[in-house]
Amino acid sequence: MGDKVHIKRDDLVLVLSGRDKGKTGIVLRVYPKRKRAVVQGVNFIKKHMRPRSATEQGGIIEMEGTIHVSNLKLICPKCNRPTRIARRKLETGFSVRVCKKCGEVVERS
């Protein structure tokens, strides 16, 4: 039941805290059970990779790590401001995300 998060894949978000505070990026992946997300260009980690085959080279690679969703704020595509999200039910019964600042429905881009 508590696996709903306020962001989805391909959303533009602002990082609120941590060493990448103030940066914006696009959400690449969301892990709702862990309440974490991977954001493009944010929270780089170094991972030691072993070569999987004889032709592949191992080494240290840099990749985006996960960040907790409480440290992310959605940037509304309509008003271009960081905003909180409300959930509203439509007449059809579907639940949609709504921008708290401008009141517009936030759709996936």
Image (cartoon, rainbow, N blue to C red):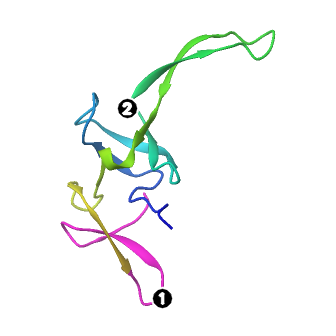
Numbered tag placed on residue 42 in the rendering: 2
Q: Position of residue 89 (x, y in %)?
A: 40, 82
Residue type, label 1: Thr
From the viewer's side, name the closer residue of 26 and 85: 85
Magenta segment boundaries in residue numbering: 89-109
Q: Position of residue 80 (x, y in %)?
A: 23, 54
**Residue at 46% across / 31% down in the picture?**
65
Neighbour class for label 2 at 10 Å: few (<14), some, many (≥20)? many
- Magenta span contains residue 101: yes
Magenta region, main secondary structure: loop
Numbered tag placed on residue 81 in the rendering: none
**Residue at 24% across / 34% down in the picture?**
21
Residue holding disc 1: 92
Disc 2 secondary structure class:
loop
Quadrant containing the C terminus in the rendered view? bottom left
* First along the sequence among labels 2 and 1: 2
In the picture, measured across the screen, residue 30 lies left or right of residue 25, that is right
Numbered label tally: 2
